[in-house]
Amino acid sequence: MKRSAPPSIRLRTGAEVLFRSADDPERLRGPNLSGVWLDEASFMPLEAYTVAIGRLREGVEQGWLTATFTPKGRLHWTFDTFASGRPDTAIFHAWTADNPFLPAGFTDTVRQQYTSSLAAQELEGDFIDAGGTLFQRGWFSLVDQIPWTATGQQQLVQRVRAWDLAATPKDEKKARDPDWTAGVLVGKTRDGTHYVLDVRRTRGRPQEVEALVRQTAEEDGRGVHILMEQEPGSAGVTVIDHYLRHVLSGYNFRGVRSTGSKADRAQPVAAQAEGGTVKLLRGSWNRDLLDELEAFPFGTHDDMVDALTLAFQGVGSAAAPSRHKPMGVGGMGRLGGTLWSGNFGFRL
């Protein structure tokens, strides 16, 4: 297939501006350049930068390079390149709140959806150490029962059970330690507190998984909404249709297509947990869930976290609509915590 020519424009001064994708750094090679701007540099491989600086030799002048990006931790190449004090390099922090074109209350609304460390990264442009994980064990307190109202009514107003089905092992390592099928039940009270009420797991065959899902639905009752992560493609549609028609017929069930990374989707849970509004009902599953949360997103397994995230999302979507739509990390790349970094004689 013949590729079309990449876009470019020529200014009235006679200068030519070339636009190139950094998805394939090798395609950035070519003639000498007066300067390079890397937009969203933290999503580019280091090779894109090393190829670009090799082209900065227009005439007898040393070219310049500037990059804009939201930091991705001290282990990312952008920290070593722009923030470690290299010669002839300057770095400038710009907070999201400094943007005069944002709607009123935008930063505060987004901050409520983030943990404190993520807010420092996304909204304030700080390089956060990547050694830590998303969740901290101490954020989740254990309770022996759900609180009741003064009139003797349980305070739970919503309950959602979400399932994450185990994937078929694709390599020998996975086959020795396969994924789990996990189902997490989350409830929400009138004051906005979330309770993880129950966790079910199995590594059984498809028929055993279906039996567990059906039995759990019968125990939860028909008042519980049931969600299941829908894998992409026609296979995912087929699985959801099978559960809808045969396994969970008569129950309030639907499949949900996931968007963004697992860590992005888990951010609202982490933010609420850090704020003390996610509690665990005491049970035999507590330690396994906390272990997985503490290791996420670097742990061997994330099945319970995925199910918890989906259940949390389901409880939120069943709530009364808010004026502000909750945002995840995926929507903040161009607005939050941008760093303007200069190299090779960059001047304001």
Image: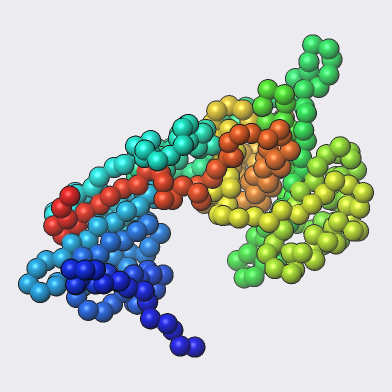
**Splitting the image into 4 quarters, where does residue 346 fall?**
bottom left
User: Position of 60 compared to 28: left or right?
Assistant: left
Give the farthest residue toward the bottom: 1
Q: Is residue 55 above or below residue 117?
A: below
Residue at figure coordinates x 70%, y 40% from the top left:
317
The quadrant holding residue 24 is: bottom left
Residue 291 position (above or below residue 9): above
Residue 2 image position (x, y, % from top left): 45, 88
Residue 42 quadrant: bottom left
Residue 265 picture location, percent across and down: 58, 48
Residue at horizontal 58%, vertical 26%? 276
The answer to whether one can see residue 296 in this image is no
Question: Residue at left 60%, top 66%?
Answer: 173
Vertical comparison of 149 with 207: above or below = above
Q: Position of residue 76 (x, y in %)?
A: 35, 54
- As drawn, the residue found furthest toward the top would be 150
For the point 28% across and 50% down, the residue is 340
Does 66 appear above or below 185?
below
Q: Is residue 173 visible?
A: yes
Q: Is residue 119 left or right of residue 347?
A: right
Is 48 left or right of 227, judged from the image as shown? Answer: left
Front-most of 238 and 284?
Answer: 238
